[in-house]
Image (cartoon, coloured by chain):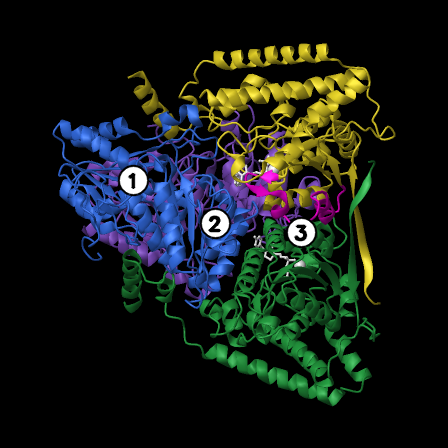
Chain colours: A yellow, B green, C purple, D blue
Amino acid sequence: MPRTIIHECAVERLEILGPEGQLDTELMPELDDETVRALYRDMVRMRTFDDKAVKLQRQGRMGTWAQLKGQEAIQAGVALAMIESDWLIPAFREHGLMLLRGVPGHLIYAYWAGDERGASFPEGVRCLPIAVPVGSQLTHGAGIGLSLKLRGEHAAAVTFGGDGATSEGDFHEALNFAGVFGTKTVFVIQNNQWAISMPRKRQTSSPTLAQKADAYGIPGLQVDGNDVFAVYTAAVEAFERARSGGGPSLIEAVTYRLGDHTTADDATRYRTGEELEYWQRRDPIPRLRRHLEGRGLWDAEQDQALKEEAVRWVASQVDAFNAMPMADPGDIFRFMYHEVPPALAEQLEWLEREVRA
Amino acid sequence: MPRTIIHECAVERLEILGPEGQLDTELMPELDDETVRALYRDMVRMRTFDDKAVKLQRQGRMGTWAQLKGQEAIQAGVALAMIESDWLIPAFREHGLMLLRGVPGHLIYAYWAGDERGASFPEGVRCLPIAVPVGSQLTHGAGIGLSLKLRGEHAAAVTFGGDGATSEGDFHEALNFAGVFGTKTVFVIQNNQWAISMPRKRQTSSPTLAQKADAYGIPGLQVDGNDVFAVYTAAVEAFERARSGGGPSLIEAVTYRLGDHTTADDATRYRTGEELEYWQRRDPIPRLRRHLEGRGLWDAEQDQALKEEAVRWVASQVDAFNAMPMADPGDIFRFMYHEVPPALAEQLEWLEREVRA
Amino acid sequence: MNAGRPLHTREPEHGLHAVAPAASPKLTIAQAVCGALASEMERDERIIVLGEDVGINGGVFRATDGLLAQFGPERVMDTPLAEGAIIGVSVGLAVTGFRPVAEIQFMGFVYPAVNQILAHAARMRNRTRGRLQVPMVIRMPYGGGIHAPESHSESYEALFVHSPGIKVVVPSNPYDAKGLLISAIRDEDPVMFLEPKRIYRAFREPVPDESYTVPIGTAAVPRTGGDVTLIAWGAMVRICLDAAAALEKDGVSVEVVDLRTLNPLDRDTLIESVVKTGRAVVVHEAPRTAGVGAEIVALINEHALLQLEAPVSRVTGFDTVMPYARLEEHYLPNRDRVVAAVRNVLEF
Amino acid sequence: MNAGRPLHTREPEHGLHAVAPAASPKLTIAQAVCGALASEMERDERIIVLGEDVGINGGVFRATDGLLAQFGPERVMDTPLAEGAIIGVSVGLAVTGFRPVAEIQFMGFVYPAVNQILAHAARMRNRTRGRLQVPMVIRMPYGGGIHAPESHSESYEALFVHSPGIKVVVPSNPYDAKGLLISAIRDEDPVMFLEPKRIYRAFREPVPDESYTVPIGTAAVPRTGGDVTLIAWGAMVRICLDAAAALEKDGVSVEVVDLRTLNPLDRDTLIESVVKTGRAVVVHEAPRTAGVGAEIVALINEHALLQLEAPVSRVTGFDTVMPYARLEEHYLPNRDRVVAAVRNVLEF
Ligand SMILES: Cc1ncc(C[n+]2csc(CCOP(=O)(O)OP(=O)(O)O)c2C)c(N)n1
Ligand SMILES: Cc1ncc(C[n+]2csc(CCOP(=O)(O)OP(=O)(O)O)c2C)c(N)n1
Ligand SMILES: [Mg+2]
Ligand SMILES: [Mg+2]
């Protein structure tokens, strides 16, 4: 009857491909060569797409851009673990994953250029628009996971948040709800060490973010987020658990935001060059390339060709973005409700009269 | 580099005085006989005060009452661990603790009878009014704990919530904030098994509530909340940690709401008589009396005298409550701002004219 | 302006009595709400009821009584105590084809859900340019008058009326409660459905067993008259009808407009009545400043200024916190205040 | 009605220029805010600045730049990303004697804090019948016009103006920004201080180095005129002044009332002006329905109906979600719309 231990938890970290190219062959998932090359290609495309967006912004073609640079391995690894029926509920830095899930690149550009049509995805793309209010999307992930469970669909909902998002009440409510209802949800935290100027260690006192899962009685795992094999392995585990009715889980993917918070930010105000260099050496893209090269699956020529192809592909997205006609100002009104109510129709008329004049 | 354990946690449960009167003498805190008798007296007074409130409600003298019955050991134990400079930030079922911290009983009755003056506590009573929006008080506890830290006061803030309150985002934000700033806060969850009709096990999937502390990197402990010695011991530990700058902690006190949720509720709609009986056998008051009797510190005659004294004391609170003159309707306006702004003064005038007429 | 007087507007024989078959069972608003939920759930299995204590307990006002037994735990879900999650999860359900009917236990506890309601539920259709929609109902008891504890008597409708993308519906009687709730459930947009708790069980009216709808966006005129228009919603409609009856004795002919929907507002019915009477009093429980009453005054100013014989008068809650039980009667608009306001308007 | 024209009302020589000594440094609104914080923090060590990115980063608009270096991490606190906690913790600090100045990074992110602001900060004094008070300031950038991303351009002032217990202050120029913020900090009640981000750095004006206050609850009249009154706050004041200048060329004499405080409203200044001109146009960015503009119309209806020559006109945002950058210009009131509204009012 004294002090007795009534609960214990242990949080694991998963690493497969180390920063210097070391590989844990036992944990290495079974992936054929083409798939590994495809992962690399996906990551290079993301980087190229991201870099181009920053340039567009500097040219005044885009309002603001939230750079994903450095976080490609998480997005490529999760995408590979997903099946068609899965849902994606992004935060606002998952452009890479959105692309892989079928969101056209020019729409992503359009959204960030300040055009609502950028969040009108093609039919069949199971992806919510990005969520700007930090953390607010996580309960949608719980809700869609519940929806899939109620329908008995073999599918899961994956929802993303940053290290900063873990501080919002929504994070808590979402994971708790998911735990109680055993929803088919995978929560992925892209812990990129910073929430604008707030370092991870001042965001919360817990040594890991993964351990927060235990508060909801669900599994939590930390992975090296710059190790695409570790991310993929963790994601497969979590997705299969969810799809098969085993309930939700939390993945903390440890990574680093190599760019500024957004194009409106200047990260040199709050973080050191040394820290940045430390993480640049851990960049997921060269890491995977070294691995491919080591296995004889890749060479400089292929790399050059891939990069050129990526540039061409991004250029096609930019073209499509540039080719979008200006939105009709009347669109401000047309999608507020299923049918435009009379008073709103009157306001639309005012605007149309003004636009005509 | 494989799957490595990077974090472990273990949650303890503390019990000292068992339901059948068994005592863990090693863990038993050093308390002189008079103090143990005082604990018992406090608990009996609380019960009497609570029972009377239910009667007043049935007589139409009070709007609604949230019964504390069954949760007396937590409130007496925490009160004993507190010093004058500590702050109490209650939820809405801590009437007993509020009494012990100097809130006059007749004011508590007045509040629940629908009179705002009931939350205007005497000068020097370091207690916030109760918080009706579930969980919302917890960030105030973090804030006052921060305040005490910034001033270097040798004091702590204790804030309460129910098992239901742990589901609100506020719980999360408060504990996280407290963890990051190392505030002088003690969080006590009175886990009374129910949030109105929602059983504890459907409120969250974690096997304990205490383990939620680990999500914030702060200590969490479960105690038998019907064991006043365990509560006291845990509280002393947490308060001393907080006052000495060691940071916040979470105590889950496992208890049972022996009454209805409030006088507006009918618990037989959602819970069984067996469950109630199980917990009635664990009632903290007879448990402590058996202990006192076992130690020869108490007998039937003393018990009778105490109960009579408690009834008299409660009657005095009722008298004081009854003696309160009706509040001036103008009070609706007078405390909205430091100074009544002109438009509000005009509205006050309208009301005064009407009341006079 | 939009179409003329709506078809459905009931012209009741006496006061509030609905055009329900006389043989219909007489129900309270709470029962009518419950009946609407049951009949719609039977009809459409995409409907899910969720919230705190809505299942085994049947809701703290019993407005979901029996639904769990009838439809089971996959369609009637007792949730953890987290309003933000209740709405956020409902958004997730709704965008994937369910039709959630979420309950917030009291309007005083809607604040934690405001982010999900206004930043998400109300915006999803617009954000996706129509690709996704959020057909959901958010039910909640609101308003004062039952001597409830602190935070249990608030009227926050203005917050939602001001925020684009969410409809706001407030029934004033059992017949409308059922018909409006069914409309709300069938609506493709999020609808906030406010249940005036003061009259939850205050009276009964015949309510047909079968399904029927009362359209959203159309006011009712439960009493016609020529001297002055009283404009109200929810529990205040009965106060206005009482006042009208009292005034009639003095020969004042009062028209009462029951708005029933606060967004979108039925401007036509409103303006038509004021144009006819030339005088108006708006009555609501919420605080005066920037309440929905102000919008009504602004609309009348814009569309009927020249017909006004006197300033439109507002009888409202004060610009104070809603008082607790003992003083709430001093705060809430009552018959005498409405009568006095009418007299002032007539004597202007 | 309350006292007459307030003493402090500045009658500027030209347009917006403040009565600051000519030698005063010329500052932007963002710099004036920062200066007010620094000078008050120096004066009163109970003041604590807290929020997301307010410390090392100096705020995303640099409105708290340098404060961390000057006052240290116990007075300038970078907080976790949790708006509810920022305000809830501030309530705890304030009731125990501190004077927190909390920042919400953008008004679009205030919703998660609404429960703490309205259910607690705004009510603590009333709930305790004056025993406890919450002297705190909640600063936040608001409004559109800088081509910001989604959710970064909202104007939610009506929610707070309608909710009793919290003052709402909106400066329109650097001089007022400093003086009003100092008043807000010294106020014994919670004050929401809205910073129009569109003009954060749009222009500079002389702002005295030393401390001074501009009283809360008093409007300014930056331009006097006889034909029509324009009523606005924040960034819309400059739009109105531009419109007034344009109209002057056509011989229309326009008075501009800069409300500066939305709760409590300076009804006297407002009504006095409308009584004089007989015509009024209210201008705001927020959606039209049940916006603060409706309250202004209602007040004019109540206090100056007989002096009105035309309905009061509202030039506002539409009843839609705030559009993103590319369409926001179609949404926001601009000079031409104000001019057109004035012409309509004049021709009524
Ligand atoms: C509710 C809310 N508060 C504040 C912001 C402003 N903001 C945008 S992103 C951000 C930091 C997010 O950090 P994190 O969650 O770690 O994601 P990251 O940016 O690192 O991907 C902040 C404070 C917001 N968008 N929403
Ligand atoms: C934000 C909010 N939501 C809902 C309610 C209604 N309500 C009052 S108490 C309660 C249950 C609280 O359960 P718990 O936290 O376990 O405390 P207990 O009543 O058991 O002491 C609910 C749902 C409320 N007061 N506040
Ligand atoms: Mg981050
Ligand atoms: Mg409980």
Q: Do discs 2 and 3 belong to a common subunit?
A: no
Cβ–Cβ below 8 Å for labels 3 and 1?
no
| Image quadrant where residue C208 sits | top right
What kind of element bears circle 2? helix
**Distance between mark 2 and mark 3 Cα atoms:** 28 Å
Q: Residues within 10 Å of mark 1 (few under 14, many from 20)?
A: many
Q: Dot 2 corresponds to which residue?
A: D69
**Distance between mark 3 and mark 1 Cα atoms:** 51 Å
Q: Residues within 10 Å of mark 3 (few under 14, many from 20)?
A: many
Quarter of the image with the C terminus of chain A in it: top left
Q: Chain of mark 1?
A: C
Q: Position of residue D135 (x, y in %)?
A: 41, 59
* Nearer-the-camera pick, A329 or C192: A329
What kind of element bears circle 1? helix
Name the residue located 84 percent from the left edge and 67 percent from the top edge.
A1
- Mark 1 or 2, closer to the camera: 2
| Image quadrant where residue C33 sits | top right
Q: Position of residue D258 (x, y in %)?
A: 26, 43
Q: Is residue B221 above or below residue C229?
A: below
Q: Dot 1 corresponds to which residue?
A: C298
Q: Dot 3 corresponds to which residue?
A: B216
Does the magenta-highlighted stretch encompass residue A209? Answer: yes
Q: Chain of mark 2?
A: D
Q: Residues within 10 Å of mark 2 (few under 14, many from 20)?
A: few
